[in-house]
Amino acid sequence: MTQSLANNFLRISLGEFRSATKVFARKRIKLGPALLAFEGGFLSIESGEATAVMHAEGEWHGRAIFSAEILRALATVQPPGDPIPVAYANGHLLIGTMTIPCQWNVVSEAFLHNVSNPGLLDLLALERTVARAELRGAGLGTKMRSAREKAERRIRNAAAQLAELEILPADIWELVEARIALRMRRGQ
């Protein structure tokens, strides 16, 4: 199903964006795939060990996952304009004037109800698809945070073991992301 630009369009003040995203510009911070979500008037961007939350106005019906390197660039050099537009359409996220390829996941309440005893992969998939309020209600927020930390540790360990083969953590994350996408398709 293609999501249209009109259904996924937000506006954020430049000052709010600048203040919230400066956490991603820190030099020693470890970033992972960036997850952008909107609910209750707040846009959140999570990556690795950092989260930014900012007020936003508009309509949004999913979650976008995109490159941490692009997130770091956006935090270093803010997009022009005030307010900053954020939109999604056809596999691309627009932030200011930058068009970013992304993975899009429609928020699915059904997915949460179909997972009775979530494993590591289930928890990683839930993090990308279910509204934060529902996760708090189901008591899975702490489990999801632990699952993300466990996955990051395992990926770092695997990358260390495979370093001689020139396999990077980003390569392993791609494989994990593919498995998460497959789990989400099966769960919905």
Image (cartoon, rainbow, N blue to C red):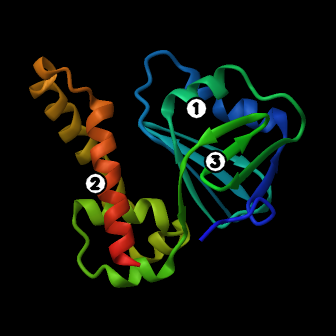
Residue annotated with mark 1: 71
Residue 147's disc is 2
For image coordinates 33% across by 58% down, the residue present is 180
Q: Quadrant of the C terminus?
A: bottom left
Q: Residues within 10 Å of mark 3 (few under 14, many from 20)?
A: some
Above or below for 181 versus 164 = below
In this rendering, is residue 81 above or below 53?
Answer: above
In the image, what residue type sits under mark 1?
Leu
Q: Position of residue 52 (x, y in %)?
A: 60, 41
Q: Nearer the viewer, mark 3 or mark 1?
A: 3
Report, in whole angstroms, how far the alpha carbon at label 3 lies from the one at label 1.
14 Å
Label 2 crowd bin: few (<14), some (14–19), many (20+), radius 10 Å:
some
The part of the image, by quadrant, that contains residue 22 is top right
Placement of the N terminus among the 4 image quadrants: bottom right
Q: Rate crowding at label 1 as few (under 14), some (14 to 19) or many (20 or more) other CA atoms within 10 Å.
A: many
186 vs 75, nearest the viewer: 186
Question: In the rendered structure, are the residues bearing label 3 and label 2 in contact, judged by CB atoms less than 8 Å apart?
Answer: no
Q: Which residue lies furthest to the right in this view?
A: 82
The image quarter in which residue 157 lies: top left
Q: What element carries label 1?
A: helix
Residue at left offset 84%, top offset 41%? 13
Name the amino acid, label 2: Ala
For label 3, the residue is: 92
Identified at 57% across, 26% down, the residue is 72
Type of the residue with mark 3: His
Q: How many angstroms separate mark 3 from mark 2 (CA)?
A: 27 Å
In whole angstroms, how far apart are the C-alphas of marks 2 and 1?
22 Å
User: Which badge, 3 or 1, is on the more N-terminal residue?
Assistant: 1
The percent coordinates of residue 7 (x first, y second) are 76, 66
Residue 123: mark: none
**Residue at coordinates 82% horizontally, 33% vertically from top-left?**
15
Q: With respect to residue 61, does 22 lie above or below?
A: above
